[in-house]
Image (cartoon, rainbow, N blue to C red):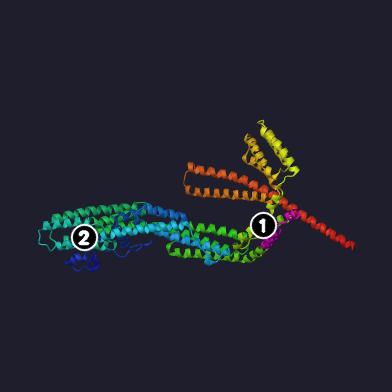
Amino acid sequence: MSEQDNLQNADGKKDLNPTQNTSVQEEPTETPKAEENTQPPVNESTEDDVINEIDESNAEDAEDTSNSERHSIEEKDYHAMSLDELVIELEKLVKNEKVQTIKKQVDTIKEEFTDKFNALIDDKKEDFLSKGGNEIDFHYSNPLQRSFKDSYKEYRSKLTAHYKGLEKGLKDNLSTRLEIIEDIKALTDLDETMNTKYKQFKELQERWKHAGSIPRDKYNNAWNSYHFNVERFYDLLHLDRDLRDKDFEHNLEQKTKIIERAEELANEENTNRAFRELQNLHKLWKEDLGPVAKEHREVIWERFKLATKVINDKRQVYFSHLDAVYEKNLEFKQAIIAEIETITNDVKNNSHKAWQTKIKEVESLRDGFFKAGKVPIKVNEATWAKFKEVVKNFNHKKNDFYKSLKNEQYENLKKKQALVDIAEANKDSDDFEATTPLMKKIQGDWKHIGHVPRKDSDKIWKKFKAACNHYFDRIHQQRNAASEEEENALVEKEALLKTVKDTTLSGEQKADLAKIKEYISKWKAIGRVPGKKRKIESDFNSALDTLFKSLDMNKTEVELIKFENKLQDLSSADDPRVLENERAFIRKKVSEIKAEINQLQNNLLFFKHADEKNPLVKSVHDTIKKHQDELAIWKSKLNKIKVIYNAEAKAEAEAKAKKEAEAENASEANSAKE
């Protein structure tokens, strides 16, 4: 059956008035009827497959002339992007590109964001359950989700408005084109001179060129019907041969140029760009040029199809290369899945510390999976499903482990409650000599008891802390009168402070440092001053700062020398909270500086392609170096405090051992006496 036998009108119905010339029915048209859009196969394709793909793409562009700009928008590896990068990319596309050109990118971003956000929710839920939470109480929100929804909503709103504005115009344009087709059909029946009909025909052709966009699902049928009736006009009317041949020659010349350009495109390195230009050539062939003489129609169309196939075959080689890359990505992702399974099934180390290590390893593997790139589409869903399954199994096993710790946590709760009872029973005691060691001991015992259930942790800690603080605050109030020894120490320190303030250094670093250290040693030897006069300690440190500033010394060494002086004052305080508070403060500083360094290092990832000499990048590196130097100082201070704690613990252990030995000796002596 010929192309014309299958030809449909633009309204989708069979042509009710096929040509009366049998010879025309049997010859091929220059563009076959478009069929439903199909994705071109990667390894082999027919000429018709390629033509259909091109026709469908041109039909899509014909509905909206701006739609062709979609080819110039970069399609990035969205699979490798993080959640915040996906949100930024979506916002950028919606803000900067025409809404009708970004459907493919937006759909891919939406799919990736949904998958990754759901995976994040699963992780957060498992973590919540592992810490004793009830599933019904779980709730997780993230500002990234709101930002994504807002941008996607804006995209849908713009898209709806765009197509709503197009709808009426497309229908009107289609009606105009169908009228032009009918007018061309009617030309053969008009009782006019040949020149008059030809003039009217050229006017109809000109109207057709400027009739505007039509719905994409009507595009190919409308154009096929138009070309059929144009050829019918030329073939069935006895036109002036010169006029007809002039049109035929012009069209043949232009179509030959199109074919030659298509043949040149076979040498284009960028296969995607070549195929897009080929698509435009087909559009010119179909929309801008009329028929050629019968003897050339099939020849030039076959030559054009052959050039098209050559370009498409080269494109298939490119797709084959992509398939190889996707297969490597698949192997990498399968290795990650296997590694997570191995970590999950490892039962050798089943402790909290071991599980924390496992959690970090799996988190790193998850990041690697997301950044690994695309896999073949036929296994994409299965690979993603398997990945989610192994991560879910890991989380379940982790969850089971931490649930098993609940009994231990409840035992710890009982132990801590017992310490709370002791603290509250003794918080109002006036026997400071006997009670103070007891209160210090239960504070130490508290630190060595493990975790309690999360819901009880803050509550029981506040009760214990309140009782201990109440007791030590009373001690502080009772010792408001300074001893005679402390008053004497104050006089000596005031004199030494004046000496330090009046000191002028020689400029010889070694000698000057020795003198400063001698001042510090003397200051330590003098001892404590009354509590209300403790400001003299900060005055002394300020005076030392003035002396140190005139020395060209390493900042770390200076800080540690000053800190050692401060430590003696802290460790000699009656209230153990003073030293504990200092340790807590230093720990906090270490954590804060580490967090600052991590944040700055993360920020550098946004400049990974920037020149190291870039002022902004250099500034970030300088700031990181500064924070690292500060971190080293604070860690050294923390280590010095740990030395004091270890010494105190050793002294307590020795005292306890001595007391037990004395008790044992006394018992043996009594037994011998009896």
| Label 2 vs 1, first from the N-terminus | 2
Position above or below: 170 against 510: below
Name the spot of residue 507 as percent of width and height, x first: 65, 31
Where is the C terminus found, in terms of image quarters? bottom right
Would you call the spot at circle 1 few (<14 residues within 10 Å), some (14-19), or many (20 or more)? many
Q: Amino acid at mark 2?
A: Thr
Residue 152 % position (x, y): 40, 58
Element carrying mark 2: helix
449 to the left or right of 161: right
Residue 424 in magenta stretch? yes
Q: Kindly report the distance in space between the C-alpha atoms of the residues bearing marks 2 and 1.
A: 90 Å
**In the picture provided, is 455 more to the left or to the right than 59?**
right
Q: Which residues are magenta?
A: 415-436
Tell me which amino acid carries mark 1.
Ala
Q: Exactly how many numbered labels are in the figure? A: 2
Mark 2, residue position? 176
Which residue lies at the image location 36% right of the left edge and 54% below the top edge?
272
Looking at the image, which is closer to me, 18 or 111? 111
**Where does label 1 land, which residue?**
467
